[in-house]
Image (spheres, rainbow, N blue to C red):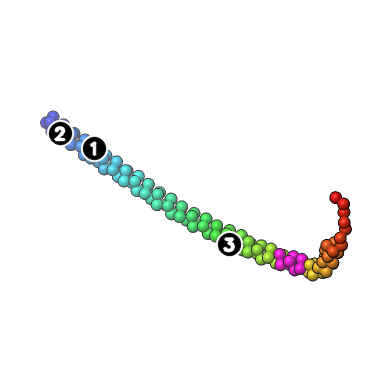
Amino acid sequence: MQSGKASAGIQTLLEAEKEAAKIVAKARQYRIQRLKDARTEATKEIEALKSQKAADFSTFEKQFLGSADETVSKVTAETDEKLKDVEVLFKKNKDQVLAKLLAEVVAVKPKVR
């Protein structure tokens, strides 16, 4: 009888070991699944953040590129206005400058050197 009890005790221990192995396997599988889920969730969050930052950058870029276009047109208008002013002054003073230049060139002033 002793051997039957020992055999039953060993059998019970083997069953308990198998049950413990199943529990450990389930725990490992659960942990692996949680890691996969966390990785998937992190990937989704990264993609969402990337798309948000890309949209923010696009908005920022449009805001300042539009501003750059306005600046270019403003500078072009100022340049055109200054060129017109220079042209008007040229036409106004052309005769006086030419007369002074000719007077200096034509007038010979001998100097001893």
Who is closer to the viewer here, 25 or 52? 52
In the rendered structure, which disc, 2 or 1, sits on the residue that comes first in sequence?
A: 2
In the rendered structure, which disc, 2 or 3, sits on the residue that comes first in sequence?
A: 2
Tell me the CA gap for discs 2 and 1. Answer: 15 Å
Q: Are marks 3 and 1 in contact (CB under 8 Å)?
A: no
Three-letter code for the amino acid on which mark 1 is drawn? Glu
Three-letter code for the amino acid on which mark 2 is drawn? Ser
Residue that mark 2 sits on: 7
Three-letter code for the amino acid on which mark 3 is drawn? Lys
Q: Position of residue 45 (x, y in %)?
A: 46, 53
Residue that mark 3 sits on: 62
Residue count near mark 3 (Cα–Cα under 10 Å), binned few <14, some 14–19, many ≥20: few
> Which residue is drawn at the image coordinates 26% and 43% (left, top)?
22
Picture quarter with the N terminus: top left
Element type where label 2 sits in the image: helix
Is residue 85 on the magenta stretch?
A: yes
Tell me the CA gap for discs 2 and 3. Answer: 82 Å
Residue count near mark 2 (Cα–Cα under 10 Å), binned few <14, some 14–19, many ≥20: few
Residue that mark 1 sits on: 17
Element type where label 1 sits in the image: helix
Who is closer to the viewer here, 102 or 57? 102
Tell me the CA gap for discs 3 and 1. Answer: 67 Å
Q: Is residue 102 left or right of residue 49?
A: right
Q: Report the magenta residues as a range.
A: 79-87
Kindly report which numbered mark, 3 or 1, lies closer to the viewer in this rendering. Answer: 3
In the rendered structure, which disc, 3 or 1, sits on the residue that comes first in sequence?
A: 1
Q: Position of residue 35 (x, y in %)?
A: 37, 46
